[in-house]
């Protein structure tokens, strides 16, 4: 059975895959049944499209504004509101962890831009992606749990008008390829994380560019050291 599953996963992912030989057969059977149910749920939500696995109690609003590559998996209890100018675009082999929220617009008065995710990207559990200003994530980037991205800010300079009535400003968030974003990281509007960066757990990225192959940590995050060849 493991040989068959290795072959099947390789077909879905398009790359070599080897299950750990220590995984019990009963656990594999449970996983297979779960994935079959997720597959049927995906077919019901997105007929005549590529294969997608959808977990239970996951809600996708404005489904016409989402596109996805092969092998996409959205776990249980996720909420995706795709209403935006560019929608949600997920590459091949993208995994969205359970209890993740992706909101592309903060208000129907001024809809947002959306989310673009590359290939082989993993979004951890309990994440929040506010995509009104646009979020782009490069290939092979992975996210820890409880990460939040906010690509929009409120205007607040006029003291005679409530903040909620002053509108918003947007710059967008760009995260390069092959990055590792640790658990409970917060990334604010206007931030660029270049290729190969590692962001330590609990860090705040509040402005500017975080240069290539850097390891950053702290509140706000500062350069700790550069990645080097082993």
Image (cartoon, grey):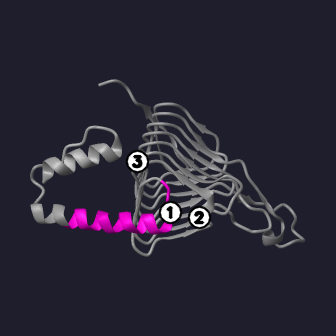
Residue at (71, 58) in percent of width and height: 112
Location of mark 2 (residue): 63
Location of mark 1 (residue): 46
Location of mark 3 (residue): 93
Question: What segment is highlighted magenta in the picture?
Answer: 30-49
Residue at (33, 69) in percent of width and height: 37
User: Are dots 1 and 3 in contact, CB under 8 Å?
Assistant: no
Observer able to see residue 181: no
Q: Nearer the viewer, residue 126 or 76?
A: 76
140 falls in the magenta region: no
Quadrant for residue 150, please give it: bottom right
Q: Nearer the viewer, residue 139 or 86?
A: 86
Mark toward the viewer: 3 or 2: 2
40 falls in the magenta region: yes
Q: Position of residue 126 (x, y in %)?
A: 44, 65
Mark toward the viewer: 2 or 1: 1
Label 2 sits on a secondary structure element that is: helix
């Amino acid at each position: 059975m493991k040989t068959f599953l290795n072959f099947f996963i390789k077909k879905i992912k398009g790359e070599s895959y080897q299950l750990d030989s220590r995984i019990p057969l009963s656990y594999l059977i449970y996983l297979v049944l779960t994935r079959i149910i997720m597959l049927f749920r995906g077919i019901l939500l997105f007929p005549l499209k590529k294969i997608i696995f959808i977990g239970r109690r996951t809600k996708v609003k404005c489904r016409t504004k989402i596109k996805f590559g092969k092998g996409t998996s959205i776990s249980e209890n996720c909420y995706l509101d795709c209403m935006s100018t560019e929608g949600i675009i997920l590459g091949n082999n993208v995994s969205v962890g359970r209890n993740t929220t992706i909101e592309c617009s903060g208000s129907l008065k001024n809809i947002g831009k959306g989310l673009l995710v590359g290939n082989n990207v993993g979004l951890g559990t309990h994440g929040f992606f506010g995509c009104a200003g646009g979020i782009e994530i490069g290939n092979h980037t992975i996210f820890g749990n409880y990460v939040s991205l906010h690509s929009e800010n409120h205007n607040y300079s006029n003291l005679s008008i409530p903040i909620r009535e002053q509108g918003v400003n947007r710059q967008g968030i760009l995260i390069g390829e092959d990055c590792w974003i640790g658990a409970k990281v917060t990334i604010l509007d206007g931030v660029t994380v270049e290729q190969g960066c590692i962001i330590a757990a609990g860090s705040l990225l509040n402005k500017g560019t975080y240069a290539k192959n850097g390891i950053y940590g702290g509140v706000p995050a500062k350069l700790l050291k550069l990645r080097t060849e082993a």
